[in-house]
Amino acid sequence: MSGGLLRRKTIIEQPPEHQLARTLSWPHLVALGVGAIVGTGILTLIGVGADRAGPSVLLSFVVAGAICACAALCYAEMATRIPASGSAYTYSYAVLGEVIAWVVGWSLILEYSLVVATVAVGWSGYATGFLAGLGVVLPDALTHGPAVAGNLVEGTVRITAMGVNLPAIFIIVVVAGLLSLGTQESARINTALVVLKIVTLALFVAVALPHFDAANLKPFAPFGYGSAPGGGGVKFGMMGAAAIIFFAFYGFDAISTAAEETKRPERDLAIGIVGSMVACTAIYLVVAAAAVGALSFTRFSNSPEPLALILREIGQGGVATIVAAAAAIALPTVILGFLYGQSRIFLVMARDGFLPESLARVSARGTPVRITMVTAVFVSMIAALTPLDVIASLANAGTLCAFVAVAACVLVVRRRGEAAKGFRTPAPWLVAPAAIAGCCYLFTSLQAVTQISFLAWNAAGLALYFGYGRRVSRAA
């Protein structure tokens, strides 16, 4: 039985109807990574992190960034060893075995779906605020999903207000349509929007930094440096915030899903993954320092548009409008990166027999239109009906699982003595275990309802595997 559960997949050449067009080079991949990483995490979730850690959210960024850097080095090696679509799912299938790959793939479905939904909800907040500034006020019930109150663990959750987040649905449909036009065309537009996003953050720093006041950093860690439970099961403290801020760093894993569309995967994938992580870490630390130094965290911690709020509070209303407008325009790059990644993971799962094979077919332009549209419909329903903090936290759990699996893959292939053609993780017996330990610790720092929901999701996934997936697997 274990032989069947741990059977491994051999990476083979795909038939013409399943082949993707190789149109991307390393600048496209760096832009894809920066576009996917820099987004809701710094534009929206910095307020959530500050609410849980105070000024020590700066250290939360450092901790989350260090753990993600270790994971990124592992991803860079596996992406060049196995230059095929599917990211952590494909690596696990080729190295660790089918049942583990199923769990990882199931977790990636959770991660990518909820990330797209989270960013769409964050975009909706900025877009609604921007439109209101122009005098266009949307009905409140069409700008958010159902509002909930209470504690899911204690069984006291109740809906306090109904709603459907129409702007979130709109932006997902627009991005899915763009991806369907072609990968190279999407990459060009993504690169332009990434430049706009970086310029916007530079503008925020230039305006906010002169208002830096060291008094705003005191007390530096009002909730401590660890992870302590608060009201409603939420974890406070520097590490508690790091478990949420972690969301702000991942996105580089979406680059690894582009392996089959990269011209020189053995070189370009490592440059894209590591390069985008280095750039984004520097950007985040500068922006976060400017934010918490310019205004007390208590005044922007619960805002859906914290950077714009900070600018308004320091008397820069005009610049705040520019930042809100740029966020509304540029945040879709994150949706594009993750929707792109999820559609490629679904594509590979369809090739492996876990989803209908017809979904693996690509268009004449080498684009998986069918699976992209199915993915868009799926995540639109989540974005329309789910609150931001719930989906962001649960998305982190799926990502942590994938990161642990990729780090484990590096240790296994090194133990087997398998030669690598491209990038090799430096000090693998230190970096990979650090990624695993860091991810496991961050998982314990997530709120209890997130941990329970993640375990329930994977229990359902394993039941589906033993009842359906193991039987239809092409590897069988």
Image: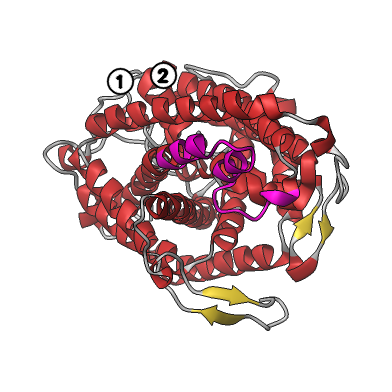
What's the distance in space between the residues labelled 1 and 2, CA to CA? 8 Å
Amino acid bearing label 2: Asp
Q: Nearer the viewer, residue 132 or 431?
A: 132
Q: Is residue 262 rendered magenta in the image?
A: no
Q: Secondary structure at mark 1?
A: loop
Instruction: Please state the horizontal and vertical placement of residue 335, each as a whole percent of the image.
Output: 40, 45
| Residue 189 image-quadrant placement | top left
Asked if one can make out residue 353 in the rendered structure from this viewpoint, the answer is no
Q: Nearer the viewer, residue 472 or 257?
A: 257
Toward the left, the furthest residue is 364
Q: Which mark is residue 263?
A: 1
Residue beneath label 2, please? 268
The quadrant of the rendering that contains the C terminus is bottom left
Check if mark 1's residue and mark 2's residue have beta carbons within 8 Å: yes
Q: Secondary structure at mark 2?
A: helix
Q: Nearer the viewer, residue 247 or 328?
A: 328
Which residue shows up at 49% across the image and 54% down it?
A: 118
| Residue 429 image-quadrant placement | top right
Q: How would you classify the magenta stretch by its main secondary structure?
A: helix
Instruction: Please state the horizontal and vertical placement of residue 231, each as a whole percent of the image.
Output: 78, 68
Instruction: Please state the horizontal and vertical placement of residue 195, each as a whole percent of the image.
Output: 40, 25
Q: Nearer the viewer, residue 426 or 245?
A: 245
The scheme the figure's colours follow is secondary structure
User: For this view, does 34 lie left or right of residue 346?
Assistant: right
Which residue shows up at 36% across the image and 31% down it?
A: 193
Amino acid bearing label 1: Lys
Highlighted magenta segment, given as a residue range: 298-325
Closer to the N terminus: mark 1 or mark 2? 1
User: For this view, does 21 lie left or right of residue 381?
Assistant: left
Asked if one can make out residue 136 in the rendered structure from this viewpoint, the answer is yes
Which residue shows up at 65% across the image and 44% down it?
A: 245
Q: Is residue 321 rendered magenta in the image?
A: yes
